[in-house]
Every structure is written in C-alpha cells, then in structure tokens.
Amino acid sequence: MAAPISDMFSFCVDPGRISISVEVRLIDKIKGKGLFAKRTIRKGEAIFVERPLVSAQFLWNALYKYRACDYCLRSLETAEENGRRLSGNPCLSLPHPEQCRVRRELHEACPQCQVMYCSSECRRAAQEQYHQALCLGPSKEEPEHPLNKLQEAWRNMHYPPETSSIMLMARMVATVKQARDKGHWLSLFSQFCSRTANEEEEIAHKLLGEKFQGQLGVLKQLFTKALYDEHLRSWFTLEGFRSLFALVGTNGQGVGTSSLSQWVHGCDSLELRAREREQLDAFIDQLYKDIEKETGDFLNCEGSGLFLLQSSCNHSCIPNAEASFPENNFLLHLTALSDIKPGEEICISYLDCCQRDRSRHSRHKILRENYLFVCSCPKCVSQAEELDVTSEEEEEEEEEEEGEGDGETEGDDLEDEMTDV
Ligand SMILES: [Zn+2]
Ligand SMILES: [Zn+2]
C-alpha cells in the first residue's frame, strides 16, 4: 500500500543528491517515521528544497486581496505594490527596483475561469494535475455553484488566522480524479500519518470549535456535491472525510510568500557603501513600522501544502532545522540551524519562537492539542526532572488566551515565516 521510501524524495529538487545526505527511517509505532542525517551537515546548509504534492492559498487570505499564483503561491504583486497596500501609502516608492523578482509580463490567466498564475509553466502544471477537475469556467462568480458554496461554508466556519484549507482536500481529490496512475497518488497520500477515530474527532474539534460534528457533516455534504468521484468512494463517507480532514489539519504545512520580503532579502545582499547601507536599512525599518501600524501581522500570501519528505521530520523543542520559503513561492527550504552529525535525527519545531520559550508544561499542552503527541525531546526530558517553577504564572496566561478564542496556538512554521519578513 505505502509507497517505497525512495519515493519520499521524489518532490525534492535534485533527489539523488539529497538521498546521499539524509534518510527516512521508521523509529517505532508511536513516533512513526523520522528523518536522519547520513553525513555531516553544517549549520546554515540547505538540507533539501521540496515542492508540495498539493498546496492552496487560504480562502480569507485570497478574499483580502493577497494576490498569489493559484499553483505555486508566488505573490503576484510587485514588491512596491505589496509595500503600498500593506503600509496604506499609495505613493511609496522602493529604491533598487531591480531587486523585485515579480515579472508581470509572464503572468497568465486560465482562459476559462480567469484564475491567475505567475507563469505559463504554473498554468500548465495546475491544468495537468488538478485544475481541469476544479475549473469553474464562466460560473466562477456563481454563488450557487457547489464548489463556491463549499468555500463559503468553510470561510464561515474557519476565521483568520487560518490554519488549514478545505481546498487542499479538494485538490487531493481532483489530483486523483485526473491522474492516469491513481494508485501512485493514493500511495503518496498514504505516506502522511494517519490517526485513530478519536484523534480525528479531537482535530476536527480543534479546527472547527464546539459545533464541529454538525459542521463536519455540512462540509462533507457540500464536498461530495462538488467533487464526488466513484474511484474515491471511501473519501466521501463521513469517516473517510473526517480522516482526510485530520490528515490535512495535522500534516498541512503553512506556506507564506511575499514579494516584499524577497525584495528585502535582495537588498540585504547588495554590496553598498556604509552610508548607503545605513540609509537603506533605515528605510526598510521605517517601512515595516508603517506596515505594522496599518496591517499588523498579516504580511504574506498564506496557504498550506502537503510536503512529503518534510512531513517525516519530527518535532523537537530545540530543533536543529527550520523550514522557510525564501523564493517567494511554495518551494520549502529546510535549513540546518546547527551542525548535524551523521546518524543524528533532523527535527523541526512545530511551535513558533514565543511558544518554544514557554515551560515544558505549556509546550506539551500546545503540542497535545494541535498535534496529538507528547514531546520527549532532550529539552523536555531534562526539564521533566526540574520543578515546573513557571507553570503557575503561565497557567494564568493560558486561561487568558483561551478566552480570546481558538486558533492562536496553531504553531506551524507559517508564523515563524511571518515574523521573519
Ligand atoms: Zn506560479
Ligand atoms: Zn480555470
């Protein structure tokens, strides 16, 4: 049933090179798979670059005019347009415009539904993988279309900050529907860790709130109406739908793209005279202050994706690797945060940086609620022997947070990515 482990590299750039550096091993029944170094990996080194099996922009994010390529999530605004919108300053003009990599002249729309892509390559790739099955054609604006109703229902149940996407599930269905080799795709999707019925309920509860059972039923009905396929009968039963929902909820990796941050990275690597450097840095600092005042934290085109190799990375509260999206698209770069020895496990943190600094007790609570496991990383093991000195204070904090509504503890790397910009 499961794909051979060699397939785990098949969505990476240069899979041959990566299979020399790392390997996926089965650890045990509880932890499942893990990623291990086969050679010394140096701090700062890119361990691998991987594209997702499927990815999709979040629906609220798109509604709020964060324009992204419908396939690779590349921001379609130029860095300057991006900066203008986010800072609320229509006269903003960016120095070093050559550091903006957005190429308007390459953008292409789907001729039927007008959905936008950053290039003809992306348009073709989407068309070949799933878009034929999802293209609404001229009825794109038709509110009664089942796919539009599904998206609207999802938006009404899942407010920002968004952490998961119903469209990821739709694209999984459409991918299998369109595939000539359906078994291949099914075995790829089967690599993502599966859950017991109880755990799936917990995840649905976490993502949809108190009324999750009814809402899951509503979503399942709309999903079936929009996408039913005989080959995937089992995905359209209530149990099958719940499993798919849980798969996307726990394995979906946040993706954040930004033409402005790509421009900033470009500016950072320019060789400038000291005075020019100072001026440019001051300009960028001021710009981010203005953006923070106007838009707060929501800087990026945001979505989520299913990454095959990256999904085999376990969590650690002291990670030795981290994911980022420096190319302003869905290509995930896994970078070493410290030197990694041959045989050592490569771990990322599912927590954002603020969550990582909290007590063992608080970290465990977040990980249990969102990812359903008890962390036994070296940091947690060593702290288990210490008294939980900070826990009382933090419990108060947590109570306050819980009053603010759900969602904010959903610590995927997206939030890291956002604060990175
Ligand atoms: Zn694209
Ligand atoms: Zn279309």
Image (spheres, grey):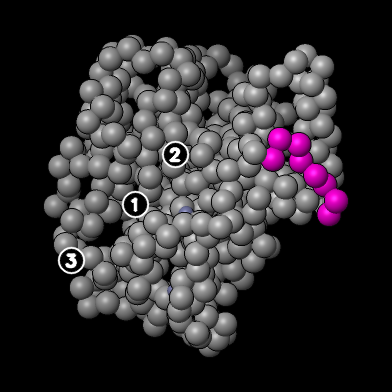
Query: Image quadrant of ligand 2?
Result: bottom left
Q: Residue at x 51, y 57 (%)?
A: 106
User: Callout 2: helix, strand or loop?
Assistant: strand
Is there a contact, CB below 8 Å, between mark 3 and mark 1? no
Position of residue 59 measured from the top left corner of the image (x, y, whole percent):
57, 64
Could you tell which of marks 2 and 3 lies nearer the N-terminus? 3
Could you tell which of marks 1 and 2 lies nearer the N-terminus? 1
Give the amino acid type for the residue marked by disc 1 in the picture: Leu
Position of residue 384 measured from the top left corner of the image (x, y, whole percent):
49, 19
**On the image, which quarter does residue 31 sit in?**
top left
Q: Which residue is mark 1?
A: 53
Q: Does residue 92 show up magenta in the picture?
A: yes
Q: Which residue is mark 3?
A: 180
**Which secondary structure type mostly characterizes the magenta part of the structure?**
loop
Residue 121 visible somewhere in the drawing: yes
Up the image or down, 408 lies above or below 36; here it is below
Give the amino acid type for the residue marked by disc 2 in the picture: Leu
